[in-house]
Amino acid sequence: MEFIKGFTFGWMSRKGDFKKPEAKESLRLLKERTNTDYVIISLAALQDGAHTTVVDYTGDHMVADEELIDMINYARELGLKVILKPTVNCKDGTWRAHINFFDLDVPCEPKWKDWFKSYTEYQMHYAKIAQDTKCEMFIVGCEMVQTERREKEWRALIEEVRTVYAGPITYNTDKYQEGNVKWWDAVDVISSSGYYPIDDWENQLERIENIIKPYNKPFFFAEAGCPSRSNSPYVPNDWGLEGETDMKAQEAYYKVMFEKAGQKEWVRGFGLWDWKALLHKEEEAEQNDDYAVYGKPAEKVIKEFYAAK
C-alpha cells in the first residue's frame, strides 16, 4: 500500500455546508498548504444515546448525498484521493466508544441485533456512494470500543459492505485497542487512532507492531493529531483538556510523532485530525486551541513531512 499522506476533512459538517464556496476553498487550501494527497471525508450520523438502536443519517446534521458526491468530484479535480468514513455520534454527548448492549437478549431492553441492523443500513448507504465515486478506501467504523467484542456482527457487516463496495476496507480502532479487535483478518487494512503521549511513541509503536505483524496487512493511523494547547502533547486524545493556547506544544507533538512513526516502514500513513470544511480565519489561528493546524506552525511541519514522503 502506498503511503497515505492524509487529512480528515469536513467532520461535523451539516446539510448545506459542502455547498458553500468556503468549503471547496478549504479543501483546495488543505492540499496546497499541507501536501496532503488523501482526503478522509468523515461523516457523523446520530443516535440518541449509547444504548439506543436507531442510527439517523438522513437529518440536517448530515451533508446531503448530492453535495457529498460533488465534494468528492471536486477532490478528484484537485488530484486528491478519497477515503469515505461514515461514523456515528450520540446526541446526548456520550462518546461512541461507549455504545453498548447486553450480550444476552433481554425482553424490553435494546438489543445488539437491532443496533447492527440500523448501523449496517447506514454503512451500506455510503458504501454504495463510495463505489459509485470510486473512493480509494472505505472505513466501516471508528473507535467503537464496546462494539468490537461483537465479532460475528462485525464480520457480517463487512461481508455485506463488500457486496456493494469493491475497494479496500478498514476499521479505525481507538488508541491502545489494536489488540482488542479479533477480526482484523476480515478487513484489508488495519488502522487505529494514534493519539499517543509525546514521550511514549516508541513504546506504543513497538506494541502495535507486535500485535499486527501476524496479520500481514498494511497499517496506518486513520486519526492522529494534537490540540494547540499546553499539556496536550501528553494527553492528545483529551479534546476537553484545560490549558493555555500553545502553538509550540502542537508543533513539537507533530515533530516527535513524525520522527518516531516515520522511522517505521510498516506505518503506511496518517489521516490527521482534522481540517474543517469551514476554516477559521488565518489571522485568528493564534487564538485557536483546537486540533486544527491551519495557519499554525504545525501546518509547516506537516507540509515538510508529507513533501518528503
Image (tube, helix red, strand yellow):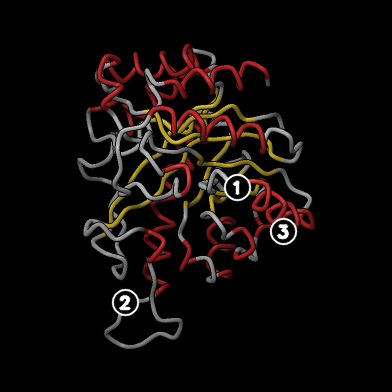
Residue 207 coordinates in the image, percent (x, y): 69, 56
Q: Counting residues from the N terminus, which is met first, the one under dot 1 or under dot 2?
A: 2
Q: Secondary structure at mark 3?
A: helix
Q: Nearer the viewer, residue 286 or 7?
A: 286
Query: Residue 252's x, y, as percent?
Result: 51, 31
From the image, which quarter does the N terminus lie in? top right
Quote the CA–CA distance across marks 3 and 1.
12 Å
Q: Report the residue marked by disc 3.
A: 211
Location of residue 106 by image quarter: bottom left
Going 21% across and 45% down the picture, which residue do you hit? 59
Which part of the image, by quadrant, shows the C terminus? Answer: top right
**Viewer-nearest of discs 3 and 1:** 3
Structural distance between the alpha carbons of marks 3 and 2:
33 Å
In the depicted structure, whether residue 232 falls above or below residue 248: below
Per the image, the residue denoted by label 1 is: 191
In this rendering, the answer to whether 107 lies above or below 33 is: below
Q: Which residue is mark 2?
A: 110
The residue lying toward the viewer, choosing from 52 and 28, is 28
Nearer to me, 168 or 80: 80
